[in-house]
Image (tube, rainbow, N blue to C red):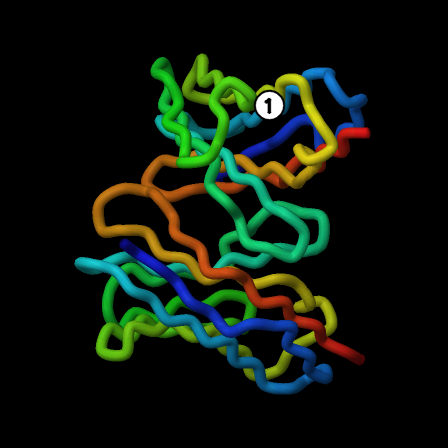
């Protein structure tokens, strides 16, 4: 079945550092790929998504590129802020349908 | 954008009582709603998928008689935790879907 693997956290960075959170997936066909962010005590918010190979999703300075050849969708940000501290979930949805398969989540802590 | 609300945002109840959590899509009609459970520092675990007007489909290991799901309209689904016990304490998140899922803010349940 489909699966998503993302790097374990926590990831601790200083403000303005470069962020990469790795995500790889296993799926049949051509899934859509997502990054969600969860702030403490809150639900999930969609951060960005990509629906086909080589698409780049971007939002709030975060980017991720759908790499079919490496089955990856790594999340990057050039300069993190303290307010980016949260848990980030990589997820995929099959080509047909709206079910989501989540990775285990990566906690990011940004220190001033 | 698509907005999903949950009520209550947090609830404390005594062991043996039942608790109802509401999930509403505020500005769109959702043919499908999903209920997730999240333990501290863990990913989301899908509990059940609910389609309007039909019985919910429960994931393996989820007791359908304990977690009652009703999806009476295209904008409302409810999850009732019956005869709650301390081990049911968790963060419950719903999502409402059209082509993709939109998540509610979550409900924290504490059973004493």
Q: Looking at the image, is B53 positioned above or below residue B94?
A: above
User: In the rendered image, which residue does mark 1 sit on?
Assistant: B22
Where residue A1 appears, as percent x and y from the top left, is: 27, 54
Where residue A83 appears, as percent x and y from the top left, is: 71, 67
Where residue A4 appears, as percent x and y from the top left, is: 39, 62
Is residue A83 visible to the viewer in this orientation of the structure? yes
Q: Looking at the image, is B26 positioned above or below residue A62?
A: above
Q: Residue at 55% of width from left, 51% of height from top?
A: A45
Viewer-proximal residue, B42 or A12? Answer: B42
Q: Residue at 32% of width from left, 41% of height from top?
A: B99
Q: Residues within 10 Å of mark 1 (few under 14, many from 20)?
A: some
Q: Is residue A35 left or right of residue B83?
A: left
Q: Residue at 62% of width from left, 22% of height from top?
A: B81
In the picture, residue B88 is in which quadrant? top right
Q: Quadrant of the C terminus of chain B?
A: top right
In the picture, residue B104 is in which quadrant? top right
Where residue A8 appears, as percent x and y from the top left, is: 55, 72
Q: Pinpoint the chain carrying mark 1.
A: B
Viewer-proximal residue, B66 or A53? Answer: B66
Number of numbered labels in the structure image: 1
Is residue B78 visible to the viewer in this orientation of the structure? no
Q: Is residue B83 left or right of residue B62?
A: right
Q: For numbered disc 1, what is the local secondary structure?
A: strand
Q: Residue at 40% of width from left, 26% of height from top?
A: B50
């Amino acid at each position: 079945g489909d699966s998503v693997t993302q790097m374990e956290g926590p990831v601790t960075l200083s403000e303005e550092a470069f962020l990469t959170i790795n995500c790889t997936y296993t799926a049949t066909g051509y899934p859509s790929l997502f990054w969600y962010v969860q702030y403490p005590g809150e639900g999930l918010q969609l951060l960005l998504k990509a629906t086909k190979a080589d698409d780049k999703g971007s939002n709030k300075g975060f980017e991720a590129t759908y790499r079919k050849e490496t089955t990856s969708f790594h999340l990057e940000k050039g300069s993190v802020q303290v307010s980016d501290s949260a848990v980030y979930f990589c997820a995929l949805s099959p080509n047909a349908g709206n079910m989501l398969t989540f990775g285990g989540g990566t906690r990011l802590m940004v220190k001033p | 954008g698509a907005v999903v609300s949950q009520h209550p945002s947090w609830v404390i109840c005594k062991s043996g009582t039942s608790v109802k959590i509401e999930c509403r899509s505020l500005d769109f009609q959702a043919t499908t709603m999903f209920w997730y459970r999240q333990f501290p520092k863990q990913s989301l675990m899908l509990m059940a998928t609910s389609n309007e007007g039909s019985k919910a489909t429960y994931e393996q290991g989820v007791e359908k008689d304990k977690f009652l799901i009703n999806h009476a309209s295209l904008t409302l689904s409810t999850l009732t935790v019956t005869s709650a016990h301390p081990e049911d304490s968790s963060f419950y998140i719903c999502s409402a879907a059209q082509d993709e899922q939109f998540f509610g803010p979550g409900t924290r349940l504490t059973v004493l």
